[in-house]
Structure formats: C-alpha cells, structure tokens
C-alpha cells in the first residue's frame, strides 16, 4: 500500500567559517564557507492528495504565526520548483513544526525547503538523486543545496558549489550552544557593507580544513571565523560572545549573516551554566550537537 504522508526532520546549520570573496556582475556575492549541521530541527509533514487537477494545490501551515504560509515560504517554492522540474502536478498539505528561529543565520527557511524536496521525492516516487534535488534547491535559496546533504561541507561560488570535507576530526565531542538575540539583520544590507572594503583574499576555510585533517583542535578553534561579524559588529552579538567565553566556551562565533551566536563547549556543566545565564535574557537559546545529515525521515514505514 502506497504511503501518502511523509514526515521529515530538517536540521539547522552553523558557519564554521564565512569569508566574502567577491561580487558578480549580477549583484550576487561570492563566498567561501564551511557549513555544519546541528541537531536543532524543524519537523515537516507532507501529505499527498490524490485529486486530479491541472495545477498545483498547496496548503501550508506552521506553528509560528509570523511565518508566511504562501508563495513567500521556501516550502511553498519547493513544491512549485519540484513540480516544474519533474513535470508533475503536486497536490499537497504541508505542516511545519518550526523550532529553528527564522532570520537567524541558521538556514531555517532553507532547511524547510530542502525537507519538502526530500519528502516530495519519496511521495511521488521520482527517484531524484541528491545532486538533482540540490539543483532544484539552488533556485529556492543558496543554502538549500547544503541542507539537502548536511554534515560538514565547503561551500563556494554563491554558496551552492559544495564539496565534502574528508577529515578525522571528532566534531561530535563538542556541545554547541546557540543564542539568538531579539534583533533583526538584513542580509542584503550586510552584503552591501562588504562592498565598502576589500574582499577576502586569504580564506579561513583552508587552515580550518587543514586543522581538521591533522586533528589539530587548537588550530581548528583559532580558524573559526565570520566576515559578517566583523562587518556588522552588532552590540548584542558581542555581548553574547563575551558571556559564552567567560563561562567556558572554547570559541564563540556568529553564524551566517546573524544574529545567532554559537559557542563550542567540551564540558556539559559549563554549557548548562551558560545556557541558564543566557536563557534569562534571550528566549531563543538552544543546546545542540553537530550531526552528519541534513534531512531524516521518521515515518515508520521507512525507518531503518
């Protein structure tokens, strides 16, 4: 019997490095960054309706009222682009249980778009490869291809050219604390600021990847970097970074265009202590771990 409902867990990402390397004639900026999935996740359920129409019928709902549930949502766009790519009509109901903060530098929207693509691929039995799903995802947003794969990857170009990073470095030994201050960051404005200074020539990913291959923790922590942090110098971000470092974080860095800050810990007591301190002022504070996947099915029929 065919299953007409699929539930996917879609994971957030952090940037271990982020360097802005240039600007293309079309206005897009080029980047060099190492991205890493973490265990904070959104839960996406996609249900297929067997009704015969000649156009997509997309019903979208979310547990967060501020999230748009129309064509502005990446999950909605994912259905449209998947339908176009495969030449099939999709009649679906999508329910998003959102835990990843939005506009936070954690690829929450991109994770949802990727999750819907993965779900549709299974529901409609289209057997697309991850490469093909990533190709569709690149039309939705630059982080969507990475969110299809997850793990630890080098992203270049506009962020859609991905390479696996082979390493023996144990990222799982760390605990990751995420904290999003209640401020907004305009990504276009952040990129605009980068136009007023020279673009990065020596990217941090080179030394970071070398440190991971050599299992060198000191150099790994030293190379964690985000261009947007030094460009924007957001007061709340600097404050959170200081609190994390003063309370046992091995390193603390902003993710993406912000404003979420992550701290890396090897001590659960120090992490819990920092969590308790930050949670009093910042409601969007989360304790996570790294993970090596971007999407995971939880339907019993497909459980492995």
Image: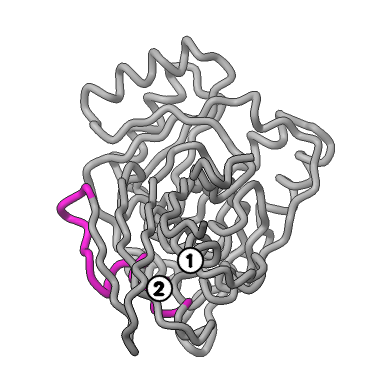
Separation of disc 2 and disc 1 at Cα? 8 Å
In the rendered view, does 143 fall on the left or right side of 108?
A: right
Classify 212 as above or below 166: above
Q: N-terminal of the two: label 2 or label 1?
A: 2
Q: Report which quarter residue 140 is drawn in.
A: bottom left
Residue 288 visible? The answer is: yes
**Quarter of the image with the C terminus in it:** top right
- On residue 79, the disc is 2
**Location of mark 1 (residue):** 120
Classify 291 as above or below 184: above
Residue 229 visible? The answer is: no
* Residue nearest the observer in this picture, 95 or 242: 95
**Tally of marks:** 2
**Residue 66 counted in the magenta span:** yes
| Residue at image location 31% in from the left, 46% down from the top | 98
Give the magenta range: 63-82
**Residue 5 counted in the magenta span:** no
* Residue nearest the observer in this picture, 29 or 272: 272
| Residue at image location 50% in from the left, 46% down from the top | 14
Q: Position of residue 103 (x, y in %)?
A: 31, 55
């Amino acid at each position: 019997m065919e299953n007409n409902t699929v539930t996917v867990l879609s994971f957030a990402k952090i940037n271990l490095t982020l360097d802005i390397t240039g600007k293309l004639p079309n206005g897009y900026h080029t980047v060099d960054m190492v991205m890493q999935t973490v265990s904070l996740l959104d839960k996406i359920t996609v249900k297929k309706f067997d009704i015969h129409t000649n156009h997509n019928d997309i019903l979208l709902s979310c547990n967060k009222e501020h999230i748009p549930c129309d064509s502005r949502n990446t999950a909605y766009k994912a259905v449209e682009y998947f339908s176009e790519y495969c030449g099939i009509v999709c009649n679906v109901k999508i329910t998003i249980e959102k835990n990843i903060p939005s506009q936070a530098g954690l690829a929450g929207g991109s994770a949802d778009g990727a999750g819907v693509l993965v779900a549709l691929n299974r529901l409609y039995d289209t057997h697309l490869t991850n490469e093909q799903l990533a190709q569709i995802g690149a039309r939705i947003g630059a982080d969507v291809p990475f969110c299809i794969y997850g793990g630890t990857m080098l992203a270049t170009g506009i962020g859609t050219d991905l390479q696996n990073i082979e390493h023996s470095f144990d990222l799982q030994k760390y605990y990751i604390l995420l904290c999003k201050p209640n401020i907004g960051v305009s990504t276009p404005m952040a990129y605009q600021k980068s136009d007023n200074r020279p673009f990065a020539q020596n990217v941090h990913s080179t030394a970071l990847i070398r440190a991971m291959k050599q299992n060198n923790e000191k150099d790994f922590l030293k190379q964690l970097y985000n261009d947007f942090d030094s460009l924007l110098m957001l007061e709340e971000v600097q404050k959170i970074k200081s609190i994390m470092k003063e309370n046992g974080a091995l390193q603390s860095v902003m993710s993406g265009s912000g404003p979420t800050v992550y701290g890396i810990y090897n001590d659960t007591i120090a992490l819990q202590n920092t969590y308790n301190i930050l949670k009093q002022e910042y409601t969007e504070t989360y304790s996570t771990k790294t993970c090596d996947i971007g999407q995971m099915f939880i339907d019993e029929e497909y459980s492995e």
